[in-house]
Image (cartoon, helix red, strand yellow):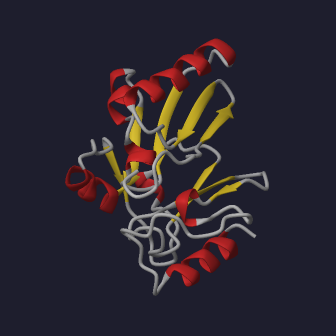
């Protein structure tokens, strides 16, 4: 990442009955293909869909690998709009959100336990978050930092005015 070098990036692999759901790709198609191979070897269930949390390389850099594998991909409609400007491949499907921040169910079919929430602009204008229903797991993507982080990281596309309010909205959505 310009100005930062290589940085860690997290996502989720969620087992949902006889299938797997992904949250975010790796940085590249090759790295994402490696994740798909690991899933095949270790979990041996089909990856049904992937949802990406915003239009940055560390979250959407492996979209072609997912598409080549026949995996349905979903992103915030704004992420899909921004992706080409960032040199990224857009998801196949666009998620829309109600005024309260929760995903419109019609745009997120077969998401199973994934609860998708738009907390407002923060790390980026399009960042979304994902919780796993029935668990205490909530994934804030790049919006939420490790408690040991010394900074908010890459703020190149951040909305610093609303960042704190969006982080609080995430916390309220996934108490």
Residue 17 is left or right of residue 3, and the answer is right
Q: Position of residue 34 (x, y in %)?
A: 51, 21
Question: Is residue 1 placed above or below 155 in the rendered structure?
Answer: above
**Residue ID at (33%, 46%):** 93
Residue 147 in picture, x, y percent from top left: 74, 66
Give the tally of numbered discs: 0
Q: Is residue 95 above or below residue 143?
A: above
Q: Is residue 162 left or right of residue 63?
A: right
Q: Residue at x 60, y 60 (%)?
A: 140
Judge by depth and name the residue closer to the eye, 58 or 65.
58
Give the camera-side residue of 36 and 160: 160
Q: Say if 79 sits above or below 111 in the image.
A: below
Q: Quadrant of the C terminus?
A: bottom right
Kindly give the residue lying farthest to the left in the view shown.
Answer: 85
Q: Position of residue 92 (x, y in %)?
A: 30, 41
Residue 134: % across, % down: 77, 51
Q: Residue at x 38, y 62 (%)?
A: 96
What residue is at 38 percent from the left and 29 percent from the top? 29
């Amino acid at each position: 990442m310009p100005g930062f070098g290589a940085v860690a990036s997290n996502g989720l692999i969620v087992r949902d009955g006889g299938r797997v759901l992904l949250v975010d790709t790796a940085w590249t198609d090759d790295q994402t293909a490696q994740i798909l191979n690991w899933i095949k070897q270790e979990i041996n269930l089909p990856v049904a869909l992937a949802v990406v949390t915003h239009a940055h390389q560390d979250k959407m850099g492996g979209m072609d690998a997912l598409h080549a594998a026949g995996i349905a991909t979903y992103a915030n409609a704004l992420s899909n709009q921004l992706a080409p400007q960032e040199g990224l491949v857009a998801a196949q499907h666009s998620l829309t959100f109600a005024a309260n921040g929760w995903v419109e169910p019609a745009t997120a079919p077969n998401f199973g336990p994934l609860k998708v929430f738009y907390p407002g602009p923060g790390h980026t204008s399009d960042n979304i978050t994902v919780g796993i229903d029935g668990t205490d797991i909530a994934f804030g993507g790049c919006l939420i930092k490790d408690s040991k982080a010394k900074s908010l990281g890459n703020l190149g596309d951040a909305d610093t005015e609303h960042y704190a309010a969006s982080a609080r909205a995430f916390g309220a959505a996934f108490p």
